[in-house]
Image (tube, grey):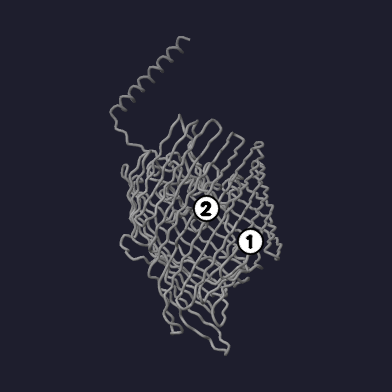
Amino acid sequence: MKKLLLHLLLAIGSISSYAQEQADTLKTQELNEVVVEARNQRLGAEVSTYIPTAKQKDAAQTAADLLNRMAIPQLRISPNDEIKDLAGKSVDVFIDFLPATKQDMEGMRMQDVKKVEYYDFPTDPRFLGKAHVVNFVMQKYEYGGYVKVYGWETTSNAGQASVYGKLQYKRMTFDVAGGAFYLNEKHAGSDIYETFRLPQADGSLKTFERNSIQESSKWRDHTYWPTFKALYSTDKITIQNVVGADFNRSPINEQSGFILYSPDVSPQADYYNNSTNRVNSLSYNGYWNFILSDKNSITFSPAYAYSHTNTGSRYVEDGKGEYENAANDDSHQFKADLTFTHSFGKWGSLNAMFQTVITTNKTIYSGTANTSDNAHTYRVGPGVQYSLTKGKVYGMVGFGYHWDRQEYLDYKDNSAAPWIDFSLQYSPNDSHSVRGEFHHMKSIPSSSYRSAAVIQSNPLMSYTGNPNLVSYGSYDAGINYSFVPSNKFSLSAFATTWIVNNRYVYDYTPSETGILRTIKQPGGPYSQWNYGVYGTLRLFDRKLQLTAQLNATSVHNGDPYNLNKTHLVYAFQANFFLGNWTFSGLYYSPQGYPDGCMVGTWIKTKAFYRLQAGWSNSTWNFQLQLANFARWHWRSDKSVMHSKYYDKIEQTYSINDHALARLAVTYTFGFGKKVERGDEASQQSGVNSGILK
């Protein structure tokens, strides 16, 4: 026993001596610096996650501004803050899993954004079946409130001011918001170059050009909106109700100039054109989510919208007469979506859904057409979605039916069609992700295209609708690859296609004295392809961020337009962070794209470029932009359309592509112990009118 204790004491002494020697060595040995950097970008099979930096949040004024500065590889933010995926498809925005609008995103406090999630075809019922989703996850607080003021003004006599207020007490959160927008534009309008080919009684074809040259214009527009929101939230219940109104006035939108005919079928004449528009809207949007157990939940989303619309126009051409038109419309829409979700654990989850949409339009026309329209559209449809995640693979398949009933005066139509969603995503690790998708559905024609009223807008052009329109089908498919090896670099590549069948199109029917624009169905085949790449590079500890994109659009637009076009677009952007200051530059090459599948119009835009400087902290944010500073004319987009009997080239004028300075300011202050921010009240819009377009 004594020997054992002696050996133990000797061993302890040896260890102590060795430890002292190592400590002495560490005192004199210089260690290399070790820096550990957290990953701000992670790709996953179900969701991709991005964490904004403090500098990005301080520099951003709105959610779209923040997404632009984060340069998320699956998203593309346009210069006017539209949020799209790389192929140009709509992306729905949620804040803490609740649907958000543009005004919600303006009212967010950027410092409260914890992370941003991106989903493709999520089956989480809280996303209401949307295909592509951005979800902002916000900082949680105990109680309190805040006020945010946001406003901007431009050198083109346009501006906006908005106020957002939030108060949270226990499980209730209340939001009150309101805003105003104004525009006083003296450079809006267009020059229109038309070619008419009119068959005559003797079998000849009368061909001539009619050119409308604008000399002056005036446009005034203003909007006011209040909104109130109440949210009740617990661990198992979320109930949100939003009521709002929107009042839009455009009392003046006038242009004047002269008309030239070639050959000289009619003498030169002066013209005057003015249109007015007034829309009053009320709306309600609800979101109710109930978690029944760890495997079952129910989500119900009711909505109602009402709009009252008054429009009027007056066109005068010397020697050709005067054409006045007016329309008064009352429109109602009720929507309800119900989803029951069951989780099978490791075997995925199932959503059972039911949708209802009811739209009514009552329209009265006066002027060149004196008539009234009554239209009713009903849609009901069940559906199911099943999703499964197995390791690095996420798959979703959904299918269902839409039953549609359309009533217009004495016309009635009943139809039924399936819809199909499919998505498959593979992420071998958090740096790579590849996704494929397919979607098919049928869409109901808007009531505004059904009117049988014949409205004459000028001496040579009249237009009408088609009461017999039926639902049309569309198919789209795509593939997307994303690569984010580190915080310093990301790259995405994509290719998509969109095909429409049984589509309705504008058709220009000639007579001896002019053109009647009708709507016929079916038109010729329509298909569109988009493909490109998008990359981001961050240097100097992410103080400098460089982004570039290259994408192309190819279109085939069949009868009656027979249009085939391909256009390549490239863009570059740089952001530099220097303390509380940020500097950025942006360039977009001229774009070319189709104006939807209904028309044969190809639109060409000007190049867009912008320099921006900003200063910000957690309370104040100032941004000064200088856009298109080397361009001092008012010419903007140019559109071209060719058909058998009628061609139209339109050169628009606007402030959009003229040299422009814009100053935007936000100020946010909070009160109380802590504040839950995000999901602010927003401007609420009504339902589209049934006035013939």
To which residue does mark 1 refer?
444
**Does dot 2 land on a helix, a strand or a loop?**
loop
**What whole-number distance in Å separates the C-alpha atoms at marks 2 and 1?**
21 Å
Give the residue drawn at x 59%, y 61%: 690
- Of labels 2 and 1, earlier in sequence is 2
Q: Nearer the viewer, mark 2 or mark 1?
A: 1
Side of 157 relative to 595 (left or right): left
For the view shown, which residue lies furthest in the bottom direction? 202
Amino acid carrying mark 1 in the image: Ile
Side of 361 relative to 263 (left or right): right
Q: Quadrant of residue 517?
A: bottom right
Q: Position of residue 285 (x, y in %)?
A: 58, 46
Q: Which mark is residue 395?
A: none
For the view shown, which residue lies furthest in the top direction? 2
The C terminus lies in which quarter of the figure?
Answer: bottom right
Image height of 530 relative to 85, above or below: below
Q: Position of residue 25 (x, y in %)?
A: 31, 27
To which residue does mark 2 refer?
91
Nearer to the camera, 679 or 368: 368
**Does dot 1 land on a helix, a strand or a loop?**
loop
Give the residue drawn at x 70%, y 58%: 403
Image height of 321 relative to 325, above or below: below
